[in-house]
Amino acid sequence: MRREPWLRLPAVALLLAHDAEHGTDYAASLRAWLAAVGDIGKAAAALTVHPNTLRYRLRRARELFGLDLDDPDVVLAAWLELASAAGEPGPSGRTGQTPRAPRRG
């Protein structure tokens, strides 16, 4: 992701910054919804919140950050960026962190 800036969604960076500054849970809510493949009930249970709370958070994420969660390209890019930001391993087992070359000498 770091080497392919065209894959980055500015909206996700804004969302992460907003969470850090305001103590909100938009990123966690979006990640849970994505992990549940859009199943509100399953995602809400994973977050231990009421389904309406999750619906509200997703609606606010759309409004505040301009995320079109009905667009599969946006959903994929958001999932990749959130996983990378969290340092989660991808399908290859590698994290989103760019490996550094070993130092010589």
Image: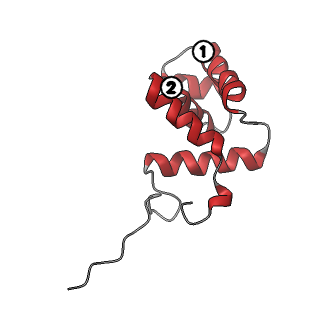
Seen at 53% across and 23% down, the residue is: 45
| x, y percent for residue 40 | 65, 25
Contact, mark 2 vs mark 1 (Cβ under 8 Å): no
The residue that disc 2 covers is 25
Kindly identify the amino acid type of the residue bearing the numbered disc 2: Asp
Quarter of the view holding residue 42: top right
Whichever of callouts 2 and 1 sits on the residue coming sooner in the sequence is: 2
Seen at 61% across and 46% down, the residue is: 79
Q: Is residue 35 left or right of residue 68?
A: left
Is any part of residue 35 visible from this angle? no
Q: Residues within 10 Å of mark 1 (few under 14, many from 20)?
A: some
Of helix, strand and loop, which one carries label 1? helix
| Direction bottom: furthest residue | 105
Q: Quadrant of the N terminus?
A: bottom right
| x, y percent for residue 67 | 71, 36
Kindly identify the amino acid type of the residue bearing the numbered disc 1: Thr
| x, y percent for residue 50 | 57, 13
Seen at 58% across and 37% down, the residue is: 14
Is any part of residue 72 visible from this angle? yes
Q: Of discs 2 and 1, which sits in the foreground?
A: 2
Count numbered badges in the picture: 2
Seen at 57% across and 34% down, the residue is: 15
The residue that disc 1 covers is 53
